[in-house]
Image (cartoon, helix red, strand yellow):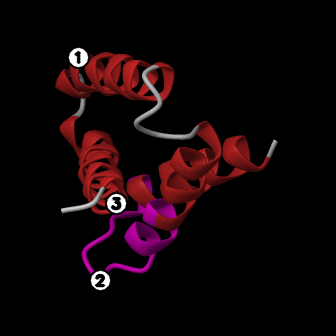
Amino acid sequence: MSNNDDLRNTQEIFGDLFGGLASLGARGVDGLVMARALARLLIRKGVLEKDEFIATMKEIVQEERERDDTTTFLIETYEQIRKRLED
């Protein structure tokens, strides 16, 4: 397996993690802190590039918004995330 395969798998894992955090409510805060810490460490260690990470977050937000089971709360949350990522 090449490093690019590993990186893509890591990005997919983060996408799934961030995609699910919004639905966790108060417990999501713990997950958010852990996810941010993990992302920061992977970027610092050169496993992820910040631009790739942000691009992947944008992709995940768009995919989640298009799901059939997305609630109004989640759509609004994803829209806020998308706007923050554009700034």
Residue mark closest to the camera, 3 vs 2: 3
Query: Relative to residue 76, is residue 51 depicted above or below?
Result: above
Query: Relative to residue 20, is residue 33 depicted above or below?
Result: above
- In the picture of the structure, the residue carrying the numbered disc 3 is 8
Kind of residue sitting beneath label 3: Arg
Q: Residue furthest right?
A: 87
- In the picture of the structure, the residue carrying the numbered disc 2 is 68
At 24% from the left and 51% from the top, the residue drawn is 13
Left or right: residue 32 compared with residue 87: left
Asked whether 63 falls inside the magenta stretch, the response is yes
Mark with earlier residue (3, 2): 3
Q: CA distance from mark 1 to mark 3?
A: 25 Å
Kind of residue sitting beneath label 1: Asp
Residue mark closest to the camera, 2 vs 1: 1
Tell me the element at label 1. Answer: helix
- In the picture of the structure, the residue carrying the numbered disc 1 is 30
Q: Residue furthest front?
A: 2
Kind of residue sitting beneath label 2: Asp
Q: Quadrant of the N terminus?
A: bottom left
Q: CA distance from mark 2 to mark 1?
A: 27 Å
Image spot of residue 40 (x, y percent): 45, 21
Query: Relative to residue 49, is residue 29 depicted above or below?
Result: above
| Residue closest to the eye, 53 or 3 | 3
Q: Where are the magenta residues, as a range?
A: 60-73
Residue mark closest to the camera, 1 vs 3: 3
Look at the numbered discs 1 and 3 and tell me whether their residues touch, using CB distance below 8 Å: no
Residue 76: numbered disc: none
Image spot of residue 84 (x, y percent): 70, 41
| Residue closest to the eye, 60 or 7 | 7
Q: Local crowd at mark 2 within 10 Å, few (<14), some, or many (≥20)?
A: few
